[in-house]
Amino acid sequence: CQAVRWIKNMEAHAGLRVMSITASDMVRQLESAVQFGQPVLLVDVLEEIDPVLEPLLAKAYIRCVGREG
C-alpha cells in the first residue's frame, strides 16, 4: 500500500489513472489512457498477466500521427 500511495502522489499532477485489472472495462480505459498519453497504475495484478496486455508491455503498438478522412 505504501508504494501505491507514493506513486499516486508522484503522478497525481500528470492525471494518473488507477485501474483494477479485474474491472470489466479495463481494456477500454487502458486504450484511452494510452491514446491520450496518460500514466496508468494497474492494481490487483496477479502472477499471470492478461494476454491483452502483452503487446502494450512489449511496446508492440503503432503510433498514428494523423488520420486521413
Image: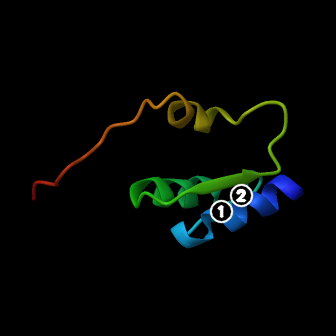
Query: Secondary structure beneath disc 1?
Result: helix
Q: Position of residue 19 (x, y in %)?
A: 70, 60
* Residue behind mark 2: 7
Indicate the quadrant containing the C terminus: top left, top right, bottom left or bottom right: bottom left
Q: Position of residue 34 (x, y in %)?
A: 46, 53
Q: Tell me whether the residue at label 1 lies in contact with that at label 2, contact meaning CB atoms closer than 8 angstroms.
A: yes
Residue 10, quarter of the rendered image = bottom right
* Residue behind mark 1: 10
Q: Indicate left or right for 39 with 5 as reference.
A: left
Query: Looking at the image, which residue is at 40% across and 61% down?
Result: 36
Q: Position of residue 68 (x, y in %)?
A: 10, 54
Near mark 2 (Cα within 10 A), the count class, few <14, some 14-19 or many ≥20, is few
Near mark 1 (Cα within 10 A), the count class, few <14, some 14-19 or many ≥20, is few
Amino acid under label 1? Answer: Met
Q: Considering depth in this image, is 16 or 67 the residue closer to the camera?
A: 16
Query: Looking at the image, which residue is at 64% across and 61% down?
Result: 25
Q: Position of residue 30 (x, y in %)?
A: 55, 55
Query: Looking at the image, which residue is at 70% across and 51% down?
Result: 42
